[in-house]
Image (cartoon, rainbow, N blue to C red):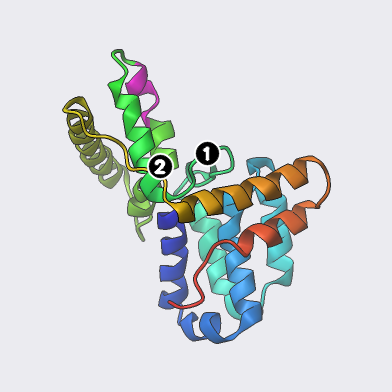
């Protein structure tokens, strides 16, 4: 998730919106809701994105176009940046936990590599180039495969996955509480997105 948010922050800067993000609470809130879509149930993302399009400031129109083309209906499939069903949603923990799958002594690991990459937005962010093509995608797959091979070797040698930090644990608990309240119909989809947005996105860039 870190790399997904990092990509959005980078685009905010590229579009000259960093100052507005830092000093305008309304702009910052709208941007953070855009980032928080990654934590929403995947079936709710389209509707919430459409809602955001109707309420976001006109100064964010280019950011919305970028998000739609890059993440909604473009380069990176939605399931690759959605973390709703991921137990550990911060990047470092996900990298460590997901690498354990390569200890499986059969070819299931290969068939699940796309799922692993989905949980590791490092891949999706690297793919998010201005003009991606099939050759750059193939090279990226190759480099990620080599990376996972190295991780597998380290695990076989006795290395352990990183432990979850207190900050990550607290974040996870807050996200879980919001999702539980949503499932119990105590809060609406709009309120869920608003609550999640308060948990992510830095005020300073």
Q: Is residue 156 magenta?
A: no
Q: Can you name the residue that lies furthest to the front here?
A: 166
Badge 1 marks a residue whose secondary structure is loop
Which of 204/164 is in front? 164
Identified at 22% across, 34% down, the residue is 159
Across and down, in percent, residue 24 comes to 60, 84
Across and down, in percent, residue 194 comes to 70, 62
On screen, residue 170 versus residue 180, left or right, reads left
Q: Which mark is residue 54?
A: none
Residue under label 1, please give it. 86
Query: Sequence order check: which comes first, mark 1 or mark 2?
Result: 1
Kindly indicate whether the residue at mark 2 contacts the one at mark 1 (C-beta within 8 angstroms): yes
Across and down, in percent, residue 191 comes to 76, 58
Across and down, in percent, residue 21 comes to 54, 79
Q: Quick check: can you spot residue 124?
A: no
Which of 75/196 is in front? 196
Q: From which residue to which does the magenta span run?
A: 108-113
Figure check: 90 above or below 25: above
Q: Which mark is residue 94?
A: 2
How many marks can you see?
A: 2
């Amino acid at each position: 998730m870190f790399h997904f948010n990092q990509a959005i922050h980078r685009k905010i800067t590229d579009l000259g919106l960093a100052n507005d993000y830092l000093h305008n609470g309304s702009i910052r809130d709208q941007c953070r809701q855009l980032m928080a879509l990654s934590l929403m149930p995947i079936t709710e993302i389209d509707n919430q994105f459409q809602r955001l399009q109707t309420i976001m400031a006109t100064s964010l129109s280019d950011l919305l176009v970028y998000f739609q083309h890059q993440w909604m209906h473009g380069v990176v499939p939605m399931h690759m940046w959605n973390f709703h069903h991921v137990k550990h949603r911060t990047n470092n923990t996900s990298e460590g936990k997901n690498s354990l799958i390569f200890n499986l002594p059969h070819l299931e690991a290969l068939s699940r590599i796309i799922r692993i990459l989905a949980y590791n937005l490092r891949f999706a962010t690297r793919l998010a180039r201005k003009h991606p093509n099939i050759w750059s995608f193939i090279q990226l797959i190759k480099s990620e495969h080599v990376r996972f091979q190295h991780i597998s070797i380290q695990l076989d040698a006795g290395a352990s996955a990183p432990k979850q930090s207190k900050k990550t644990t607290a974040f996870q608990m807050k996200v879980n509480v919001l999702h539980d309240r949503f499932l119990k119909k105590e809060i609406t989809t709009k309120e869920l997105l608003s609550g999640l947005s308060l948990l992510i996105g830095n005020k300073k860039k």
